[in-house]
Image: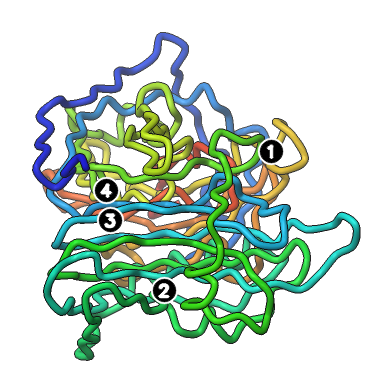
Amino acid sequence: MMKLTKITLFVAGICFVGSNGYAQQLTKAQNDELLKAKQGAIVRLDGFLTEKTAQIAYQKYPTPGPQYIISDDPEYIRVPEAIALKESVVPGAVRFYLYNVNGIKEPQKIDRKIIAMIKNTGKAPMRIKMLKYVTQKPSTNYFKLGKEGLASFLAAQPSEEVRVVKPGEAVPIDEKLEQYVVKYDELVHGFYEFLVDQPAEITVLQTDLKTSGKDALKRITNVLPPKTKSGAGRGLYGVSNYHVANTSVIDTKNGTSALVVADGASDPWIIGREGTTGQIAKLAGNYGVMYDIELKWKSTDGKGLALITWNSRSADNQWCSGMAAAMKVSGGKFNEGIIQLPKDQLVTKAAPEAVLIQVFKPTGNGEEQTIKLTYSPPGASCLPTPLIFVPVDLNP
């Protein structure tokens, strides 16, 4: 077993400004609309949004974090009973992202359970303490689960409860999954972070409604192959957190600029290992990875800085028709906190729709300030979701 907790990475990724970047200008009406908008609201910016926005140069590096497991390959489990993921972890912190769908439609659609189990593979009793716990009822509204689940994960606090599991025994990671009925095409979406003090094995299973997770784990042996047509990936990854910082200070006098992470190019997908085959695993989307972003900015022309986002991939295919996200943002015009994007409706569709995240105010003498964001690629949405920084006249 590769002990990913002992791997340390020092390579920094750098994204440079592209030669096709150019500065966009708001009309006075658009400027006024941004200033009037509530946080998380959709604002129409006709003719403004483009993927050719000048890119913010940044450096990123992995920071200490938990072992990371995601179950999303195959996304759709199309056989009545099967194992969708089986991974081993070492003692320490674990982040686990569950993203699987009941995909049975032949010979008929049937109700199922999708359960995540953890087994103590050590020689002493294993203690489990939940640091972050997000459970949601299965639904066909993937955007809702992705947006609300991420917001809840960012807000989650450690539990005081400690569960004890004997050697060789297994328990559900999320006991509520034992009770949920998963209908055809419904997504089971769970987001967890916990501590274990013994080596353990995590298994995701699909089974019938009458079978408990413990019995299913004893009975089911067939493991679905990875690298299917659906899903971002599965496996155990040694990178779960990134720190991102710009390499030159954002100045409002230079016009609009964009920070783009999780695009698979300037910010490559993380690499890990798939436990049942031993194959190298790639997580297309970096879903579940937490980006701690710190950006320096200043205003030498007295303007403020509006932060917006938009669904830049709407034209790609039918699955990219909407985007729903959540993030934590530092204070500005609105208080620091976690915001669902958009806030008052489920998704933003396409340009000219933009979603207002925050408006940052300049200092009187143009001193540097720091914008802090906690971002993770939003589940169910196509990527990237660019973060656009737009100079705004606060005294129009």
Is 371 positioned to the left or the right of 320 in the image?
A: left
Q: Position of residue 124 (x, y in %)?
A: 12, 75
Q: Residues within 10 Å of mark 3 (few under 14, many from 20)?
A: some
Disc on the earlier residue, 3 or 2: 2
Disc on the earlier residue, 2 or 1: 2
Q: Is residue 38 above or below residue 33?
A: below
Q: Position of residue 239 (x, y in %)?
A: 24, 42
Residue depth check, mark 3 versus mark 4: number of the one nearer the observer: 4
Q: Which residue is mark 2?
A: 152
From mark 2 to mark 1, how far is it between C-alphas?
Answer: 26 Å
Q: Position of residue 392 (x, y in %)?
A: 41, 46
Residue depth check, mark 4 versus mark 1: number of the one nearer the observer: 4
**Mark 2–mark 1 CB contact (< 8 Å):** no
Task: Residue type at mark 3: give it.
Answer: Lys
Q: Is residue 325 above or below residue 231?
A: below
Judge whether residue 259 can be spotted in this image. yes
Disc on the earlier residue, 4 or 2: 2
Task: Residue type at mark 2: give it.
Answer: Ser
Residue depth check, mark 2 versus mark 1: number of the one nearer the observer: 2
Q: Which residue is mark 3?
A: 361
